[in-house]
Image (spheres, grey):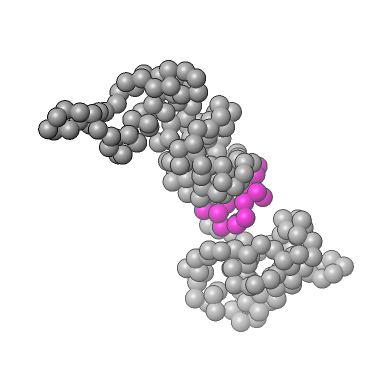
Amino acid sequence: MSGTLKGEIYNYIGEVAKCNDCGTEIYVTAIGDRNLKALYDAYRHKNEIISLEKILELPQKYAIGKRPLSLLLGWGEQTFTRYAEGDMPTKQYSDALERIYNDPTEYLKLLETNKLNLKSVSTYEKSKKITSKLLGVEFNTDSKINLAIEYMLNQCEDITPLALQKALYYLQGFFYAFTNNLLFLDECEAWVHGPVYKEIYNRYSGYRFDPIEKSEDFDESVFSASEIS
C-alpha cells in the first residue's frame, strides 16, 4: 500500500477488509489503525525516527514514569506521554531517546545530571537502582534521609525547607533516644537559623519560604517496623 505523510509518499504492507457476500471493500476500525501505524512505521524507518515500540519500552527499561522521564530529558511534562501515544518526535528528540535506549550509561549520565528536575527523590533512587543492575554495578540501598524526606512530604500538608530541616533534626534525635541508633549518617550543621543538612538545604533552597511540593506516592515498606513507628 501507499500513503502520504508530510508531503511524501511511503509504501507499507497493509490490510484490506472485504464483504464476504459482494466483495466490496469495507472499513474496519482495527484494520485502519494497523494500516496507519504501518504508514507511520515506514516514515520512522526512512527518516531514522525511533520506533513506537522502543518509546513504550523506555519507562519499563529504566523503571521511571512517563512524566518524570520527560522532565529528566528537560522537556515539557507531557511531551514523552504524547510520543508514547503515537505522536511523532522531531529528529532531535528522537535521537535523544534512541541514545538512552541503546546505552544505559547515557541514561545514567542523564539521570545524575538532571536529577533535580525530578519531583521525587524515590523516583531517582528507584531508576538508578534498576539502571545500575543493567550495567552490572552494585547500587547501595536508598539513603534513609532521602526516604525520610519522601515520607514527610507524603504525610505533611505543608512543609517549608526550614521546617523540613528541623523535622529531620528532631527525627534523628528521637530515633537515637529510643533505639540508641542513628536513622541516617548524614551530618547536621549548626547554622544561624538552626540545624541544617547542607545537601538537603541546597536541594530545596529554591522554595525559600514556600511549602515544598507534596509527594503523592510512598511505599512505607522501605522502613523497618521500628523506623516507621
Question: Can residue 76 be seen?
Answer: yes
Name the residue rendered at 63%, 64% in the picture: 214
User: Number of callouts in the render?
Assistant: 0
Report x, y in % for residue 22.
Answer: 14, 29
Of the pair 203 and 173, the residue shown nearer to us? 203
The reply, left or right, for residue 135 in relation to residue 204 is: left
What's the magenta bit mostly, secondary-structure-wise?
A: helix
Report x, y in % for residue 28.
Answer: 27, 37
Q: With respect to residue 43, does 215 lie above or below? A: below
Q: With respect to residue 60, does 40 lie above or below? A: above
Residue most extreme to the bottom: 178
Name the residue rendered at 51%, 50% in the picture: 65
The reply, left or right, for residue 44 in relation to residue 208 is: left
- Asked if residue 139 lies in the magenta stretch, the reply is no
- Asked if residue 126 lies in the magenta stretch, the reply is yes
Question: Can residue 145 be seen?
Answer: no
Report x, y in % for residue 126.
Answer: 52, 53
Q: With respect to residue 22, does 78 lie above or below? A: below
Quarter location, residue 165? bottom right
Name the residue rendered at 30%, 23% in the picture: 13
Residue most extreme to the left: 21
The reply, left or right, for residue 163 in relation to residue 54 is: right
Report x, y in % for residue 128.
Answer: 54, 48
Quarter location, residue 211? bottom right
- Quadrant location of the N terminus in the rendered image: top left
Q: With respect to residue 216, does 181 lie above or below? A: below
Name the residue rendered at 55%, 38% in the picture: 107
- Quadrant location of the C terminus in the rendered image: bottom right
Residue most extreme to the right: 192
Question: Magenta span covers which residues?
Answer: 113-130
